[in-house]
Image (cartoon, rainbow, N blue to C red):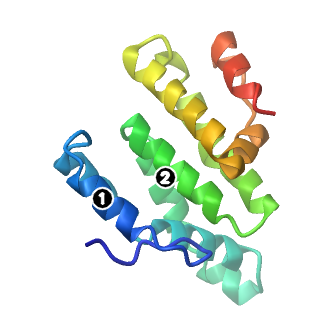
Amino acid sequence: MVSGVKDARGTDHSLALAERRRDPAIGARSCHAWVMATDGLIDRFWQEHRLSQGTRQERLEASGAAWGEVDDLLDGPASEVVRMLVALAEAAPSEEGVGLVGAGPIEELVARRAGQFDSEEGRELLEELDTAARRSARFRSALAFAFFGDEVPKGVREQLERFR
């Protein structure tokens, strides 16, 4: 079993991730890579955020490495990326944190993949985002904080902005 995959609230995601590893529809290699890449990441992300809001010494300790890891993972498979973003939103320590997920990684993901929404992969991402917003109130709130510029196709903007 995967251990140590806890969010900032202490919710243990190990069981869900272990079950995903056994799901042949996901693929052992992809899922294993995702588990390894995100093991403890949610916790580190919010720890760094807390430190960045603290004393000078705490701000110096906030390396930003977890933010960089999240950014790197935005290039992964749609379902994995959206799961990570949902976990970040669900673990956010406050409404401000939920907004940070929307105005940060969610906004970056959509902008980065703006030219792909007419492809199968882009449609899959849009469907994953839509499903996550319908299932998770905190993810839906995070999505409402994201700004989608003109580089994002109008239909995609309208579909995602309906959750505001």
Which residue is under mark 1? 19
Q: Nearer the viewer, residue 51 or 24?
A: 24
Q: Is residue 149 left or right of residue 33?
A: right
Q: Which mark is residue 102?
A: none
In primary-sequence order, the first of circles 1 and 2 is 1
Find residue 77 and report its image quarter. Answer: top left
Coordinates of residue 56 in the picture (x, y in percent):
75, 85
Local SS, label 2: helix
Q: Amino acid at mark 2?
A: Met
What residue sits 41% from the left and 13% below the top?
119
Image position of 57 with respect to 109: above or below = below
Find residue 152 and report its image quarter. Answer: top right
Instruction: Check the picture and name the quadrant holding the N terminus.
Output: bottom left
Q: Is residue 107 left or right of residue 30?
A: right
For discs 1 and 2, the disc positioned in front in the rendered view: 1
Q: Amino acid at mark 1?
A: Glu
Coordinates of residue 66 in the picture (x, y in percent):
51, 65
Bin the neighbour count of mark 2 within 10 Å (Cα to Cα): few under 14, some 14-19, many 20 and up: some
Which residue is under mark 2? 84
Instruction: Check the picture and name the quadrant holding the C terminus.
Output: top right
User: Could you give the CA–CA distance between mark 1 and mark 2, rounded to whole angstroms?
Assistant: 16 Å
Local SS, label 1: helix
Find residue 55 and report its image quarter. Answer: bottom right
Coordinates of residue 14 in the picture (x, y in percent):
38, 70
